[in-house]
Image (tube, rainbow, N blue to C red):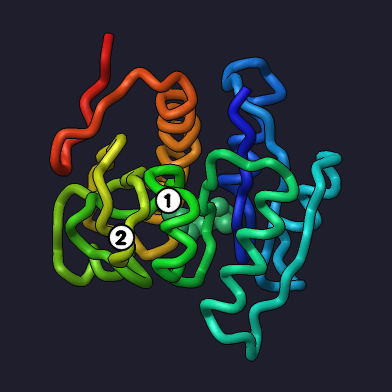
Amino acid sequence: MTRLGILLSGRGSNFEAIAFNVAAGKLPVRIAVVISNRPEARGLEKARAHGFPAVCIPSKGVPREEYDMRLVAELKAYEVDLVCLAGYMRLLSPCFIREFPMRVLNIHPALLPSFPGLDAQEQALRHGVKVSGCTVHFVDEDLDAGPILLQAAVPVVDDDTVDSLSARILREEHRIYSEAIALVASGKYRIEGRRVIQIR
Ligand code: GRF
């Protein structure tokens, strides 16, 4: 069974949604370890409460490549074969990506390639788009840029605030992240250029 390593920096609601689906038997993977780069991340407490190995490797002041090699060592110690970024607020270095080629997923709260980077929901509101959403994609060496596995769209309504739009998008994040993980775990896809094609 696919062994997930989850990397997070904060709240951890995407991690919890994944854990819920695994516990409900809807997602045939095992959560091998949850790792945070921030000691205060609420996601770490949640992981412990769910009984998963939860590890903090503080990143403050550690050079990126050195940090990423520590991460790789920890993930390998837990025999992780699929890494899921769930609100992990650090860019991964090429040396990390090389250790897990096409085995790192990320969820982004916008319809990529629109609004990459930080504060995607605020960027969408400011731009005035009428539709936004979320994207699960493979992580490559560029920011929010790898091949797209799944997307879900939500409307942007006139009285939306960053909070109301974020909440609407988050509900979809919680749904499609598990779907995308299930697809990768099944192996029933192939990648052609940037396109991820499902094999039925
Ligand atoms: C989510 O909006 C996700 O799309 C983004 O960071 C946020 C993490 O939220 N990458 P949570 O920690 O999973 O609650």
In the image shown, does 13 or 100 lie closer to the viewer? 100
Q: Secondary structure at mark 1?
A: strand
Task: Choose top left, top right, bottom left or bottom right for residue 17.
Answer: top right
In the image shown, does 50 or 186 lie closer to the viewer? 186
Q: Give the image location of residue 39, x and y in percent.
A: 76, 72
Task: Choose top left, top right, bottom left or bottom right for residue 176.
Answer: top left
- Residue count near mark 2 (Cα–Cα under 10 Å), binned few <14, some 14–19, many ≥20: many
- Residue count near mark 1 (Cα–Cα under 10 Å), binned few <14, some 14–19, many ≥20: many
Q: Amino acid at mark 2?
A: Asp
Q: Name which residue lies at 60% across and 56% down.
A: 7
* Residue 118, placed above or below residue 130: below
User: Which mark is first along the chain, 1 or 2?
Assistant: 1
Q: How many marks?
A: 2
Q: Secondary structure at mark 2?
A: loop
User: Label for residue 10?
Assistant: none
Residue behind mark 2:
144
Circles 2 and 1, Cβ within 8 Å, touching? The answer is: yes
**Quadrant showing the C terminus:** top left
Q: Name which residue lies at 35% across and 46% down.
A: 138
Q: Amino acid at mark 1?
A: Asn
Q: Give the image location of residue 20, x and y in percent.
A: 67, 30
Q: Give the image location of residue 153, x and y in percent.
A: 25, 40
Q: Give the image location of residue 194, x and y in percent.
A: 16, 43
160 lies left or right of 46: left
In the image shown, does 124 or 69 lie closer to the viewer? 69
Residue behind mark 1:
106
Q: Name which residue lies at 64% across and 63% down.
A: 71
